[in-house]
Amino acid sequence: MSELTPTRSVVLELKDERRAMHDGYVFLDEKCLLLAAEILRELGRHEALRRRLLAAYATAVASLQAAVARHGLHGLQVYPPECLDGAELRRASRSLMGVRLQDASLCGEASPAAPAVDASPEAESCRRAFAALLEAAAPLAAVAGNLVRLSLEYRRSVRRAHALQDVLLPELDGTIADLETRLEELEQEDAIWMRRAC
């Protein structure tokens, strides 16, 4: 039994509240669809970037093997690395339904590396391959972060939508039905009382 006093104004207020809750549920349901569509787009981007990273990784491993075969491990350890002082990680932010998404890329020209004592095409190729691997990793990292944020927001929105649909709206429907039943009973009692009084 509801603790509310059964009056028409209370019933109308509860019906307005139910309409607002239902509108909230519809909004959350549409938000879930938009988030799911964006997750699918980001998954497609992730897969393409992952393939690009794996190709860069395979190239880097092959060039590392060739450089180690030419210079030995100790010789390659002292080989001057690619100088990334001029490189810059650029990020662009955007928002979808309150979720902050990012795109990232490694831009800029690499500064000339220090001259090697025993330069070789294998070591130079290795240096360029690992710089390309780093360049391929930046956008993939941004997309992976996007997927985590989208997934968290999607799960949160689904929980809220289910709470509205499965708990709050049925409780409110039950309260409204109970109040309307009690109100009808009171009106019937009043009508019977009025007939007896006449």
Image: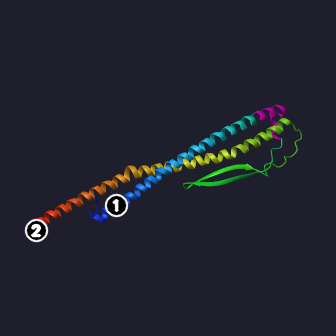
Residue at image coords 53%, 49%: 34
Q: Position of residue 138 (x, y in %)?
A: 69, 46
Q: Does residue 146 sit above or below 58 in this rendering?
A: below
Instruction: Bin the neighbour count of mark 2 within 10 Å (Cα to Cα): few under 14, some 14-19, many 20 and up.
Output: few
Q: Position of residue 184 (x, y in %)?
A: 22, 59
Instruction: Bin the neighbour count of mark 1 within 10 Å (Cα to Cα): few under 14, some 14-19, many 20 and up.
Output: some
The circle on residue 197 is 2
Tell me, yes or no, whether the highlighted magenta stretch contains residue 20: no
Please state, as top left, top right, bottom left or bottom right, where the N terminus lies in the image: bottom left
Residue at image coords 88%, 44%: 115
Task: Report the residue that reaches farthest toward the top.
Answer: 69
Tell whether 139 sits left or right of 24: right
Q: Quadrant of residue 94?
A: bottom right
Q: Does residue 186 sit above or below 154 in this rendering?
A: below
Q: Secondary structure at mark 1?
A: helix
- Which kind of residue does numbered mark 2 sit on? Ala
Query: Magenta stretch mostly in which secondary structure?
Result: helix
Q: Position of residue 157 (x, y in %)?
A: 48, 51
Q: Between residues 15 and 46, which one lies in front from this camera angle?
A: 15
Tell me, yes or no, whether the highlighted magenta stretch contains residue 68: yes
Tell whether 99 sits left or right of 182: right
Given contact means CB atoms under 8 Å apart, are the residues at marks 1 and 2 in contact?
Answer: no
Residue at image coords 73%, 49%: 106
> Is residue 1 among what the camera can see?
no
The circle on residue 14 is 1
Sequence-wise, the earlier of marks 1 and 2 is 1
- Marks 1 and 2 sit apart, C-alpha to C-alpha, by 34 Å
